[in-house]
Image: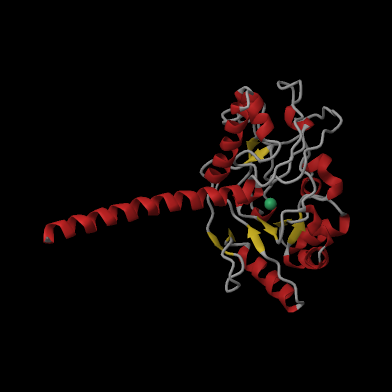
Amino acid sequence: MKNSSIKFTLALLLILIIAGAFGGYFIINGRRDDDNNTSSTAASTSEKTPTAKPQSTEQITEESKTTTEKRETTTKNKNNNNSSQPDNSYAYAYAGFNPVLADINQSKWNLLLVNRYYILPEDYSVKLSVAAPGSGYDTKLDARVAPHYAQMFNAAKEDGITLVPLSGSRRISTQKNNFENKITKYINMGYSRAQATRLAAETILPPGTSEHNAGLAMDICSLDVSFENTAEYKWLKEHAADYGFILRYPKDKKNITKINYEPWHWRYVGVEAAKAMKASSECLEEYLDILN
Ligand SMILES: [Zn+2]
């Protein structure tokens, strides 16, 4: 009697453990989908010249949301940066992505340029902290940036505006998983791995090339272009620079950023730079004079 009740308890425990593990798995995967694969509507603009410079002929959204637009093929000189040699060890070099390593040791960490030409090393890590503590949102940013977001969040709150911190820091490993999942999806549709990789990069940034991987950017309130019609967006346009944040991917700069307009993506650059960029209407690449 006693023995069988012990067996029964053990069996029950085992079932609970297995169920718990599955639950965790699904939660993680569900989150991943929310983060990056939401209703992608990217057009297939597979370029015919993969070996030339496919990255300069594509525009992608930093997240995954808006449609990729085909742009006139302007083969710009990609070698006008003064940085190191292309990092051919990059995992996606076979698909035409030949970025150099971002200068993570530069004195002005707040001006770190991260894009598809300047990537973070795979093991990049910074201290993170919650962006809007006490608000009920636990999204994190680089610990040097988080207090500025908190300040901005609180100031907006006083004006009756809630700057919901949707998505801040994102691990490079997560970015890589998202990207690989997308590649697999295209491979399953019959594309070669190189083609699949280029297509994936139209809707998800390759690992190490997102400002979220650096913990320097926050997606605020919504991942929809209609966010530009809200009071929250209007508030940000007016006040974000006072806290060091810029609209990173403006509508009229996508020929430079290579990323579609994202009214929700705000990047910390520091008050001085943010105000200067706001005044001159320059994007970060222009401000730094690092154009590809
Ligand atoms: Zn973003």
Q: Residue furthest front?
A: 1
Q: Position of residue 273 (x, y in %)?
A: 77, 58
Q: Position of residue 130 (x, y in %)?
A: 56, 65
Q: Nearer the viewer, residue 139 or 32?
A: 32
Can residue 207 be seen at all in this image of the molecule? Answer: yes
- Snapshot colouring: secondary structure
With 146 as the anchor, is 58 left or right in this view? right
Image quarter where the N terminus lies is: bottom left
Q: Nearer the viewer, residue 141 or 28?
A: 28
Image quarter where the C terminus lies is: top right
Total marks shown come to 0
With 76 as the anchor, is 209 left or right in this view? left
- Residue sitting at x 56%, y 29%: 89
Q: Nearer the viewer, residue 109 or 221?
A: 221
Can you say whether 289 is above or below 157 in the image? above
Occupied quadrant, residue 157: bottom right
Q: Position of residue 122 (x, y in %)?
A: 53, 41
Occupied quadrant, residue 147: bottom right
With 74 as the anchor, is 154 left or right in this view? left
Can residue 121 be seen at all in this image of the molecule? Answer: no
Q: Nearer the viewer, residue 106 or 102?
A: 102
Can you say whether 231 is above or below 119 in the image? below
Q: Position of residue 155 (x, y in %)?
A: 72, 75
- Residue sitting at x 77%, y 51%: 262
- Residue sitting at x 74%, y 22%: 52
Can you say whether 268 is above or below 252 in the image? below
